[in-house]
Image: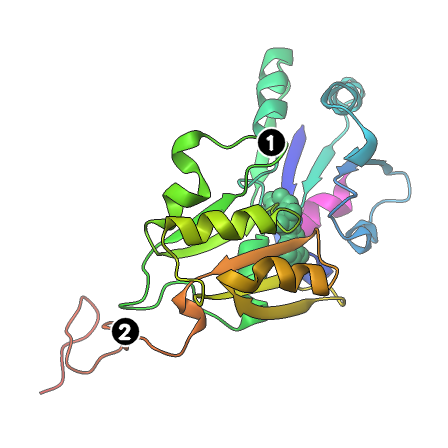
Amino acid sequence: MIHFVGAGPGAPDLITLRGRRLLDGADVIIYAGSLVNPALLEGRKPSCRVYDSAGMTLEQVLAVMEQAERAGQDTVRLHTGDVSIYSAMREQMDALDRLGISYDVTPGVSALSGAAAALAAEYTLPQVSQTVIITRAAGRTPVPEAESLEALARHGSTMVLFLSAGLLEKAQGELIAGGYPPDTPAAIVYKATWPEERVYRCTVGTLARTARDNGVSKTALVTVGRFLEGDYERSKLYDPAFSHGCREAER
Ligand code: SAH
């Protein structure tokens, strides 16, 4: 059996209990060494074989999985953050389907959440934004045209950019061209939840300079939007004048 597991954003205690249990019992661990904290490998069985997928092709990863499966062993495929976002999990699953190898999925804490925690921020503030756009700048990996930063910026919502810290010169121009005023608050969160975590608050117009001045070109999330400011309306959920399924309004 292959277990796809989300490792969380970095801190070893931000993996789920289920993920931890699967790692502890694994015969084989294939982890994305470029981003997954190796501290997560501590506690594995002494006999567990460990592969860093950073230097491997999809075919090599599949060969390791197939061999383990033939030996009746359990494999954990450990991806950073949550497995549903930029993990390249799907192509592995499709290949496993073709090979008749079964798998399951254990979610993880995405860097999306790790960065919000580092900022002590809520992405969805009443009357500010009720939408989070999760995307990336187009680089060597293209992005569908309808999802260009310029097109997405028209919504003026909260936006979180993965995989884009090295592409901010172009990205900031597109964000502004799409409609974010250059003084829209922004933040770059480097290595959220790792000991090296750093938060750089800036504006959309100063994103590229901020990244450059601080030597940040990878392992960072870029967040954009007025959610980083102080202005919002209080929530209806906890408003004494508002009734809902669990509570009557006070008179
Ligand atoms: N599946 C992962 C994302 C993998 S894509 C998740 O859910 O978080 C890799 C990108 O994620 C990096 O380029 C960076 O933009 C972001 N990232 C991963 N870990 C991060 C962290 N601890 N802090 C900030 N960004 C991180």
Q: Which residue is mark 1?
A: 141
Give whichever of 24, 56 is nearer the camera.
Answer: 56
Give whichever of 224, 173 is nearer the camera.
Answer: 173
Residue 144 x %, y %? 45, 30
* Badge 2: residue crowd in 10 Å (few <14, some 14–19, many ≥20): few
Q: Is residue 22 magenta?
A: yes
Q: Is residue 127 visible?
A: yes
Asked whether the residues under the numbered discs 1 and 2 touch, taking CB atoms below 8 Å apart as contact, a structural biologist would say: no
Mark number displayed over residue 235: 2
Task: Give the tally of numbered discs.
Answer: 2
At 56% from the left and 57% from the top, the residue drawn is 222
Asked which secondary structure carries label 2, the reply is: loop
Q: Which kind of residue does numbered mark 1 sit on?
A: Thr
Q: Is residue 198 above or below residue 180?
A: below
Residue 29 x %, y %? 78, 37
Q: Which residues are magenta?
A: 19-28
Q: Which kind of residue does numbered mark 2 sit on?
A: Ser
Q: Which image quarter: residue 100? A: top right
Mark number displayed over residue 91: none
Q: Relative to residue 245, is residue 48 drawn left or right?
A: right
Q: Is residue 79 above or below residue 229?
A: above
Q: Relative to residue 77, is residue 52 drawn left or right?
A: right
Residue 246 x %, y %? 21, 70
- Quarter holding the N terminus is top right
At 53% from the left and 48% from the top, the residue drawn is 171
Q: How is the image coloured?
A: rainbow
Residue 61 x %, y %? 76, 25
Of label 1 and label 2, which has the lower sequence position? 1
Point out the residue furthest to the bottom here. 251
Q: Is residue 136 magenta?
A: no
- Quarter holding the C terminus is bottom left
